[in-house]
Image (cartoon, rainbow, N blue to C red):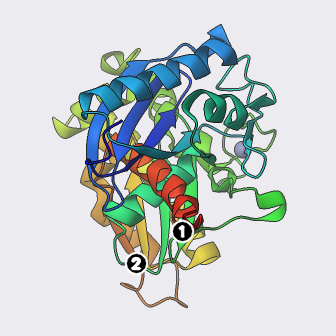
């Protein structure tokens, strides 16, 4: 360890197939960054050792700065208070796993666990599209729809410290059945797989087997069936945003995730739907913008989550 270097925290963004690790300074600069494939199915023990090894690789790459804490944003559900992941859905084999204890023992620094949607929102609030906002919602249109709300740098938490699951807002009761058991949730109507489902249902031969990225590309090229698919999905995406505004009245909504490749060109239409649906909130009171940090949002937000308790610890 080199004490002459600026201290850093490690931010970890853990998904079912990929893990990203970055070293973050108190000012929000990333000193080293690694992205690696991750096989959650191999189990928690090997997974946590891999994370610790990636942190050490980053430390070596940055010249061995002092590591003061680690934050980890993981795909939910998880218990933020106890530092345990309870997630057999997207992290198979990680049911009721203590993440904090083994990593603290391995790296000898305090470890803080967050939901990945919360971590991405904290990252965008701290260093990205939500900078300066007193209240911000981040919506990630990925495989699902993640929503996290940040107010004055603090993530909103509900009963049992749970984060909102606003991807399950009811948007169209005649819509497809959601895995949560409800019919017509926002997520199956507007997350990335919705574009693929609508493409398949269109019956257009050009859209057979199309991915969300294919649909976006064909829409951009003016393909009529692809345009109809993106128009339908982006309308549902906007109706969910109407609910976000009604529920949280955020100053800014930051939009991210892979499906933004399709929605980017419809942003003005989506903004118009939101503005036309909330007479109590004058149009323009909620800005709707794109995320700025990409793959770095989760790492920066996990780092931010780790920094705050580290700052609160009195030096001895
Ligand atoms: Zn649902």
Characterize the local packing of mark 2: few (<14), some (14-19) or many (20 or more) Cα atoms within 10 angstroms.
Answer: some
Looking at the image, residue 282 lies above or below residue 80? below
State the image coordinates of residue 19 (x, y, percent, origin top left).
Answer: 46, 27
**Compared to 263, does 99 lie above or below?**
above
Q: CA distance from mark 2 to mark 1?
A: 9 Å
Please name the residue shown 60% across and 75% down the image: 248
Residue linked to disc 1: 150
The furthest residue to the left = 221
| Label whose residue precedes the other's in the sequence (2 or 1) | 2
Does the CB distance between marks 2 and 1 fall below 8 Å?
yes
Q: Quadrant of the C terminus?
A: bottom right
Q: Position of residue 250 (x, y in %)?
A: 50, 77
- Left or right: 269 in relation to 181: left
Tell me the residue at 34%/32% (across/down).
59
Confirm whether residue 270 shows in the render: no
Given residues 288 and 190, the one toward you in this image is 288
Q: Secondary structure at mark 1?
A: strand
Visible residue check, residue 299: yes
Label total for image: 2
Up-down: is 159 above or below 229? below
- Helix, strand or loop at label 2? It is loop
User: Does 183 sit left or right of 240 as displayed?
Assistant: right
Residue at image mark 2: 133
* Residue at x 61% of width, y 50% of height: 186
Q: Which residue: 24% across, 33% down? A: 63
Q: Quadrant of ligand 1?
A: top right
């Amino acid at each position: 360890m080199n004490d002459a270097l600026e201290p850093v925290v490690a931010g970890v963004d853990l998904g079912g197939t990929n893990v990203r690790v970055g070293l973050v300074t108190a000012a929000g600069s990333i000193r080293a960054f690694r992205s690696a494939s991750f096989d959650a199915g191999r189990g928690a023990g090997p997974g946590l050792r891999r994370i610790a090894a990636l942190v050490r690789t980053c430390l070596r790459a940055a010249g061995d700065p002092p590591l003061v804490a680690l934050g980890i944003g993981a795909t939910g559900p998880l218990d933020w208070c106890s530092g345990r992941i309870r997630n057999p859905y997207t992290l198979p084999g990680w049911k009721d796993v203590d993440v904090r204890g083994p990593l603290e023992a391995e790296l000898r620094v305090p470890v803080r666990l967050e939901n990945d949607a919360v971590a991405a929102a904290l990252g965008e609030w701290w260093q990205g599209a939500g900078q300066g906002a007193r209240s911000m919602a981040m919506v990630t249109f990925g495989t699902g729809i993640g929503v996290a709300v940040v107010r004055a740098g603090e993530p909103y938490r509900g009963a049992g410290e749970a984060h909102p699951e606003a991807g399950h807002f009811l948007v169209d009761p005649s819509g497809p059945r959601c895995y949560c058991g409800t019919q017509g949730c926002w997520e199956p109507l507007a997350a990335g797989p919705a574009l693929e489902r609508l493409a398949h249902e269109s019956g257009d031969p050009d859209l057979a087997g199309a991915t969300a990225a294919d649909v976006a590309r064909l829409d951009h090229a003016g393909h009529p069936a692809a345009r109809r698919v993106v128009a339908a999905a982006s309308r549902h995406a906007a109706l969910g945003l109407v609910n976000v505004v009604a529920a949280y009245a955020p100053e800014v909504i930051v939009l991210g995730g892979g499906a933004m490749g399709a929605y980017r060109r419809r942003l003005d239409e989506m903004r118009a739907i939101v503005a036309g649906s909330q007479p109590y909130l004058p149009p323009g009171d909620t800005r709707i913008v794109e995320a700025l940090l990409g793959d770095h949002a989760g790492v920066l937000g996990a780092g931010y989550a780790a920094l705050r308790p580290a700052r609160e610890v009195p030096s001895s």
